[in-house]
């Protein structure tokens, strides 16, 4: 297998992992390219489990990117605190309907990094728990725990959204109006 074949075979998996971890297309593309540059600079032809090895490199690159980004955001936050704050946009200008897949992607993106990594490797890349543990360099039990916590957190968000939606429908049916919960104001 040559470099082009390796890239064509795994590019989509690497990009998808980057996108779901970073939640930004351009950043995902940049990190994806960095991953392949790193791979091609190493002796990749002797690697026995290519996908597992590539996913480990991908996750590490994404985590490093997020750490750098977090540091930059902390600097921005300090600067923001020193400047006068503007008032938020009115609630009625917010988008009312969002695609369900975008909501799920947002919820996954909001998970803590370690939990998000385990969820993405398990469900987006369809890796076994043991493969995810190897990539993340943690014990199998830790991956199981993180996946369980991630599912529990996502289910909680789903239940809250469903309850909010049901409350809105009941109000709308009773009064013929839409409702905005106090938590959204």
Image (spheres, grey):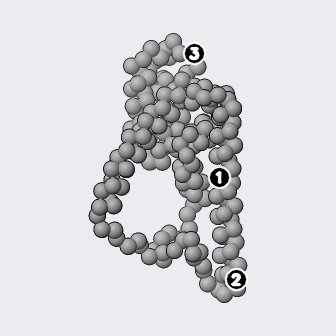
User: Residue 30: horizontal and vertical position, in percent?
Assistant: 39, 38
Question: Residue under circle 3?
Answer: 48
Circle number at residue 173: 2
Which numbered disc, 3 or 2, marks the residue that appears first in the sequence?
3
- Does residue 156 appear left or right of residue 58 in this picture? right
**Residue 79 in which image quadrant:** bottom left
Looking at the image, which is closer to me, 185 or 37?
A: 185
Looking at the image, which is closer to me, 64 or 122?
A: 64
Question: Residue under circle 1?
Answer: 154
**Residue 26 in which image quadrant:** top left
Q: Residue furthest top?
A: 46
The residue drawn where x is 48% and y is 48% is 23
Residue 121 in sight in this render: yes
Which numbered disc, 1 or 3, marks the residue that appears first in the sequence?
3
Decide: few, some or many residues near mark 1? Use Cα within 10 Å; few <14, some 14-19, many ≥20.
some
Measure the C-alpha gap from mark 1 to mark 3.
35 Å
Closer mark to the observer between disc 1 and disc 3: 1
Measure the C-alpha gap from mark 1 to mark 2.
28 Å
Decide: few, some or many residues near mark 2? Use Cα within 10 Å; few <14, some 14-19, many ≥20.
few
């Amino acid at each position: 297998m040559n470099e082009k074949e390796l890239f064509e075979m795994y590019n989509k998996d690497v990009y998808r992992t980057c996108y779901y971890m970073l939640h930004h297309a351009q950043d995902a593309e940049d990190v994806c390219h960095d991953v392949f540059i790193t791979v091609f600079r190493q002796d990749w032809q002797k690697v026995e489990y290519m996908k597992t090895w590539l996913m480990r490199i991908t996750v590490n690159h994404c985590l490093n990117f997020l750490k750098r980004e977090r540091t930059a955001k902390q600097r921005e936050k300090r600067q923001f605190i020193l400047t006068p704050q503007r008032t938020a946009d009115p609630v009625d200008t917010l988008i009312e309907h969002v695609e369900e897949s975008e909501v799920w992607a947002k919820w996954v993106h909001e998970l803590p990094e370690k939990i998000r990594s385990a969820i993405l490797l398990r469900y987006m890349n369809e890796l076994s728990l043991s493969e995810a543990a190897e990539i993340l360099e943690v014990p199998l039990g830790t991956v199981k725990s993180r996946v369980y916590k991630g599912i529990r957190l996502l289910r909680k968000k789903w239940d809250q959204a469903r309850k909010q939606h049901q409350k809105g429908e009941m109000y709308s049916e009773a009064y013929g109006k839409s409702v905005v919960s106090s938590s959204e104001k």
